[in-house]
Image (cartoon, rainbow, N blue to C red):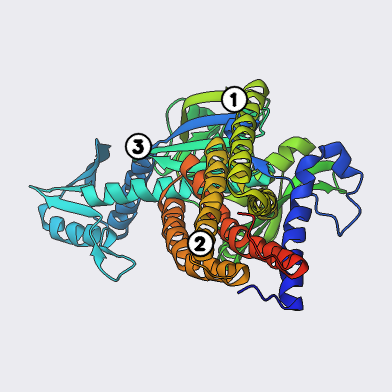
Amino acid sequence: MLHFSRWKTIAVIGACLLGVLFALPNFFSQQQLQSVAGWSFVPSQQINLGLDLRGGVYLLIEVDVESIKAERLETLKDDIRSALRKERIAYTGLNIVDDTVGVRITREEDVETARGKIDELVAPSTGLLGQLQQEYTVVTGERSITVQMTDSFLVRLTREAVTQSIEIIRRRIDELGTTEPIIQQQGNERIIVQAPGVDDPEELKRIIGTTAKLSFHLLDSSVSIQEAMNGRVPPGAELLPSVEENEGPFLIKKRVMVSGDDLVTASAEFSQQNGEWVVAFRFNTSGAHKFGDATRQNVGRPFAIVLDNQVISAPVIREPILGGSGIISGNFTVESANELAILLSAGALPAPLKFVQESSVGAILGKDSVAKGQLAAVVGFAAVIVYIFLSYGLFGAFANIALIINVLLIAGALSFLQATLTLPGIAGIVLTIGMAVDANVLIFERIREEFAAGKSPINSIDAGYSRALGTILDANITTLIAAVLLFSFGSGPVRGFSVTLGIGIITSVFTAFVVTRLMIATWVRARRPSLLPI
């Protein structure tokens, strides 16, 4: 156990030096790090501080599930209207009441045909596991048909909307360059967002809260804009305002030509032709095909580019657009063009968001938290070092050196992985310091027992390490399992604690067992002691 080959010695020393190298940037300021930024062999990544240490913005957001339900019912109503007209079935009173879509069939002999067409529209969908999922229930009365969403479908809509919103919010915040945001679900319809280092909460709310639902529609020219403004809006059409204050509203057809869901990329570009900023976009294969067909069939007709129920522009289709790409113009500044590109690239939110609660963690609170956490870690660290040295003398000094290396390895691992350090994370580091000491105590007490039993110093050390190894591994593996479970099922501060605990367990076993054994083995070969200073 005390024999170390040359390559093992080099490997242990190399691992320690590598950890120290990655930990070093945390001892310098950002300005000092920028001066060596060109040296590729020098790491420059520092530990990311969480919201409780660095300051930032905390938001509690509620997903407006009611709007999704209303949108689904509106789409169903339009589909029923189209299906009945296609079959030439006369009807009246097609409208939405509460959570249902109702229609009254004029002729009794058409009820069965109408019911069959509506059943086709609301046929059960197939789930991920192949099971049929009933989304609507259909009830037929005397010449009336009522369609209502099922409770299970409403639950699924809510779950999918929140999950999709979390992913889109994450992509939008990542585009802003925010480091390690914490985004998690709370309850059924709410989302918590913690963005460390964000100075402008209003900008964050604007980026997060914009639905960014892009769609392309044909304009409806069956009536004039003035008639539509006076209340004569044709069925299947709606009046939408323009983003430009000096432009009047537009009458568009509700049916979507192409949806923004088919967008692949969007970027802000400067147009040399008209000397203004535009947003260039590109569709996926499906979207390009639909966009090409729509423009081919409607050459010479105007169409509207709609973003969040506002018309950005309404150009005329001069020729078919078959390449699957195009530009959106609208008197953009470089900032507004870039913001729109970010929103479109991240995708549209499935529903509007409501900001229920907002709070900002200032830099003063962050610095105070850092100072208190550092003080707790330093005091605990110093107390452990003094205790171990007084208890085990020279061997205690070896353990203390390994303990310092352990802390540097944890800092290096956190910097390399760019994990976020929170106050609970600092608690995890302090806990791993105590666990590392526990391992050394087990080893040293075992060495004392072996030496008291009459064994030679070398045999006592060898037996102490070999017999304590099983106990150390058992204790640390069970704790590591707990850390993995905390990381898998926990969130926020719990995950921060589990990260530092998990890293600390691995580095503690390495330093307490391998590093101290290398130092003691080197000392034994150099001194050949007849007594143990322990």
Amino acid type for the residue under numbered disc 2: Ala
Mark 2 closeness class: few <14, some 14–19, many ≥20 residues within 10 Å: few
Residue plotted at (86% across, 59% down): 41
Residue plotted at (58% across, 65% down): 293
Depth order, front residue of 2/260: 2
Labels 2 and 1: the sequence-earlier one: 1
Labels 1 and 3: the sequence-earlier one: 3
Rendered position, 344 above or below 445: above
Q: From the image, which quarter does the C terminus lie in?
A: bottom right
Residue 236 on image: x %, y %: 41, 44
Name the front one of labels 1 and 3: 1
Residue 411 on image: x %, y %: 67, 48
Q: Which SS class for mark 3?
A: helix
The image's mark for residue 47 is none
Query: Which residue lies under the disc numbered 3?
Result: 66
Distance from disc 2 to disc 1, alpha carbons, whole Å, reads 58 Å
Labels 3 and 2: the sequence-earlier one: 3
The image's mark for residue 361 is 1
Name the front one of labels 3 and 2: 2
Amino acid type for the residue under numbered disc 1: Val
Residue plotted at (82% across, 41% down): 276
Q: Is residue 249 left or right of residue 47?
A: left
Mark 3 closeness class: few <14, some 14–19, many ≥20 residues within 10 Å: some
Query: Which residue lies under the disc numbered 2?
Result: 452
